[in-house]
Amino acid sequence: MTTILICTVGGSHQPIVTAITEEKPAYVYFICTDKDPATNTPGSNLQITGKGNCIKAKFSDEAPNLPNIPSQTGLTPEQYTVSITSSDDLDLIYSDCNQAIRAALKQFPEARIIADYTGGTKSMCAGLVMAAMEYEDIELQLITGSRHNLVAVQDGDQYRMFVNTRGIQFERLIAPYRQAWTRYAYSEAEDGLKQTAAPQNKELRAQYTRFRDLSRAFAEWDNFNHQTALDLLQRYARVLPADLSCYFDVAKRLNNEDLKIREAAQLLDLYRNAQRRAAQGRYDDAISRVYRLIEWTAQWILKTQCNIYTAAVKETDIPEGLTLTKHHESGHYQAGLFAAWQLVRFKTKGAAAQFIEAQENNLRNHIKVRNLSILAHGFEPVKASDWQPIQNWLEEQFVPMLLAETASVRIKELPKQLPAAYTL
């Protein structure tokens, strides 16, 4: 296979000569500097384009005694290109190296391309590495060797060393999907990973697979598909990172065979879901979930404590002074949100009954925000300033009441919010 070499050139010729001699590239892109504008000191391009003897064999030599690098390595003028870049402007160096790589890919699309960052200033080395990392198939190489001091590798001791960048490239590849988790955008992470080829490296491929599966697990959880989420989490029960292992027990509770326990867990999960929508700035979605949470809480309490179903309330269960609507087809009495809470007030004696006794007016005021939402009966979107008072009220009044009620099924604390960070 044809080999193309891209290398940064600095003050030492030996590493470049070693790379060319050992690789025998068909073409070389030299990234060099020109004369220093302040001191007029020659740049590293002299090592490529200089005439006659223009390179010192040793820095201690009084005068140049070697020809330029192409002459030393047998390169003809048709086999190389010289690109001039800055010595310290990293942004410009990165751009120039990127341009050289794109030129190589265009001119030699089937070739093996090696980027050697041994020579040049520190900024030139960094620029070439950064540019090469943008391309999956560019190989990174360094000329190194045994060191007798901290200055340089001894001439004659150099050898090529290919640099393993798979882990770095993998981290860069998955960075956008880690970022998606910070926004609870698990579906976005899963979709992105699906469209990304799995790494060939066995260990990295395992990390990729786990990240993709757990992204899907929390995406399903976020969409209330709790059984699918549990199934996916169970695959990794033994290897879940510490910050994720706690969700396994919560997922099991959300799929408990006991309906009373399962619904209690689902109510608290719905509250967390509403918070995630608010964190995303989706306040209409958040308030819709809160409405359902408040309604469902009353339904759960009535069903589990009084055997009253709000979709079919027995006439004998309707307290004096409360009027319920009959469904025109089934003929059953039905209780909407506020009627359901009146039934809680009259039919129960626990924390929920005390809550509605004290908080009925606040409840009605907060529900008005939902009713004016574009997702309910209004035409205006819910704003952050609308959501915050509701969130405060939920946290201070509603959730403590709900936890007091769910304590009857041994659920005494809110579940941890779904993760906003992922650790491989």
Image (tube, grey):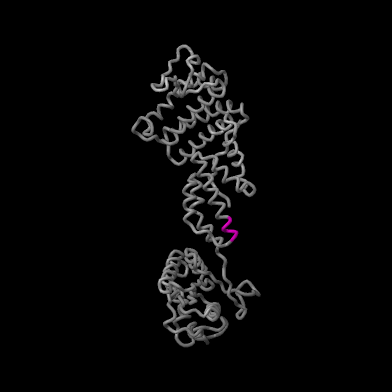
Is 199 placed left or right of 370 in the picture?
A: right
Above or below for 136 versus 52: above
Q: Position of residue 161 (x, y in %)?
A: 58, 72
Where is residue 45, by image quadrant? bottom left
Q: Nearer the viewer, residue 289 or 90?
A: 289
Farthest left residue in view: 379
Q: Position of residue 299 (x, y in %)?
A: 50, 25
Above or below for 72 versus 347: below
Above or below for 55 versus 272: below
| Image point (48%, 19%), residue name | 313
Q: Nearer the viewer, residue 311 or 269?
A: 311
Q: Position of residue 2 (x, y in %)?
A: 48, 77
Residue 87 colored in magenta in the image: no
Kindly report the secondary structure that dominates the magenta region of the rendered protein: helix
Farthest front residue in view: 330
Farthest right residue in view: 148
Residue 205 colored in magenta in the image: yes
Q: Position of residue 263 (x, y in %)?
A: 55, 31
Is 249 placed left or right of 134 in the picture?
A: right
Above or below for 247 versus 350: below
Where is residue 231, by image quadrant? top right
Q: How many numbered marks does the figure carry?
A: 0
| Image point (45%, 21%), residue name | 335
The residue stretch that appears in magenta: 202-206
